[in-house]
Image (tube, helix red, strand yellow):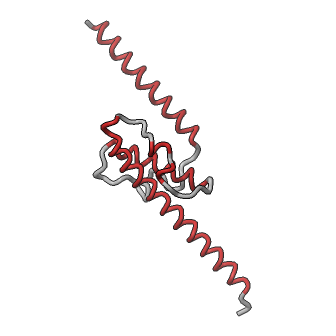
Amino acid sequence: MKLKWFAVSALAFSLGASTGLATARASAQQGPPPPGYGQGGWDAPPQEFRDVQRQGFHDGIEGARKDFDNHRQPDVKNRDEFRHPRVERSMRADYREGFRRGYETAMRHMMDSRDHDRDHHDRDHHDHDDPH
């Protein structure tokens, strides 16, 4: 009996360790997250979201970041992850809802940051031109 319990525990531990390693590898391949990401700020999914919606929300943020960095037209419907979510069929609507919210939140945040930076740069540049 003890041997069977030990075998089950060892199996559970090895599965958990390999899942964590795979997640760490996937995260490392995606590159650094946007500033403030994952700190409970603008990128935090709504509290009422279920797990699949939270996953969609985070994937939407990543999709928006990729579109923004590659100067693509912002359109959630152009993302493969939105059109063909890799979740069970019964969870697709929830995933897409979360993805759309994450995508729109990230685009709004990045556009506002870009506009703020541009305004700040223009103001600084203009101040140097003003002899008064």
The quarter of the image holding the N terminus is top left
Q: Is residue 118 left or right of residue 104?
A: right
Q: Is residue 86 above or below residue 42?
A: above
Closer-to-camera residue (57/5): 57
User: At 38% across and 16% down in the image, what residue appears?
Assistant: 11
Q: Is residue 122 above or below residue 60?
A: below
User: At 53% across and 35% down in the image, what residue appears?
Assistant: 26
Q: Is residue 110 left or right of residue 83?
A: right
Closer-to-camera residue (83/110): 83
Quarter of the view holding residue 19: top left
Closer-to-camera residue (7/73): 73
User: At 47% across and 43% down in the image, what residue appears?
Assistant: 81
Quarter of the view holding residue 41: bottom left
Q: Is residue 54 above or below residue 104?
A: above
Residue 54, image x, y percentages? 37, 46
Q: Residue furthest bottom?
A: 132
Residue 66, image x, y percentages? 57, 50
Q: Is residue 20 above or below residue 1?
A: below
User: At 57% across and 38% down in the image, what residue appears?
Assistant: 28
Residue 39, image x, y percentages? 44, 53
Residue 38, image x, y percentages? 45, 50
